[in-house]
Image (cartoon, rainbow, N blue to C red):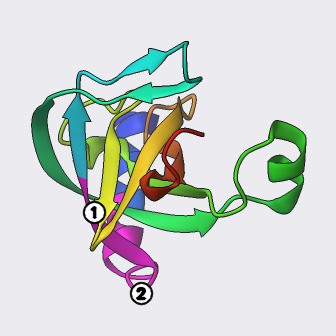
Amino acid sequence: MGIKADLNTELTKAFNTDLADAVLSFTLQSSNTVFNPATGGLASGQTISTGSWRGVFSNVEREKVLNSQQLPADVEIIALSVEAPFVPKLGYKAIRGNTEYDILRMKQDPTETIYILECVNASYGNY
């Protein structure tokens, strides 16, 4: 096995055991949402597909919020790449229970084993 395969195996095992109490299921929903320059927000579009995923939700660090002008209720979701139903993109939604989050930024670690999704609560509207 290579390093990437080893990391995927170990992280999946951790999500199922040591981190199981922190790992939450959510739905990833894609759409043809695009940036609307007139409002400075995202223009909603048609839902294309949905899929189940798991991740660890955390609040964005206060320093990041102050430096990037993100809303204080923003969350980061750390999710395993190997479990991704499809590649997340800007404007897609992460849905947990009755709460929908718009994905504002998406990063992947250098080994491509995790995604870090930076999200804002969709109920805020145009942000």
Which amino acid type corresponds to the residue marked 2 in the rendered image? Asp
- Is residue 112 located in the magenta-colored stretch of the structure? no
Give the mark, 1 or 2, whose residue is nearer the N terminus: 2
Q: Is residue 6 above or below residue 49?
A: below
Q: Which residues are magenta?
A: 12-27
Which residue appears at 18% of the width and 41% of the height?
Answer: 85
Q: Is residue 89 above or below residue 118?
A: above
Find disc 1 in the rendering and name its residue: 26
Q: Quadrant of residue 27?
A: bottom left
Horizontal and vertical percent position of residue 119: 52, 48
Which residue appears at 89% of the width and 54% of the height?
Answer: 63
Neighbour tally class for label 2: few under 14, some 14-19, many 20 plus, Cα within 10 Å: few
Which amino acid type corresponds to the residue marked 1 in the rendered image? Phe
Tell me if I can see residue 90 in this picture. Answer: no
- Most extreme residue toward the front is 38
12 horizontally vs 21: left or right: left
Q: Is residue 85 above or below residue 18?
A: above
Of the pair 125 and 108, the residue shown nearer to us: 125
- Is residue 26 located in the magenta-colored stretch of the structure? yes
Which residue appears at 60% of the width and 40% of the height?
Answer: 127
Name the element at disc 1.
strand
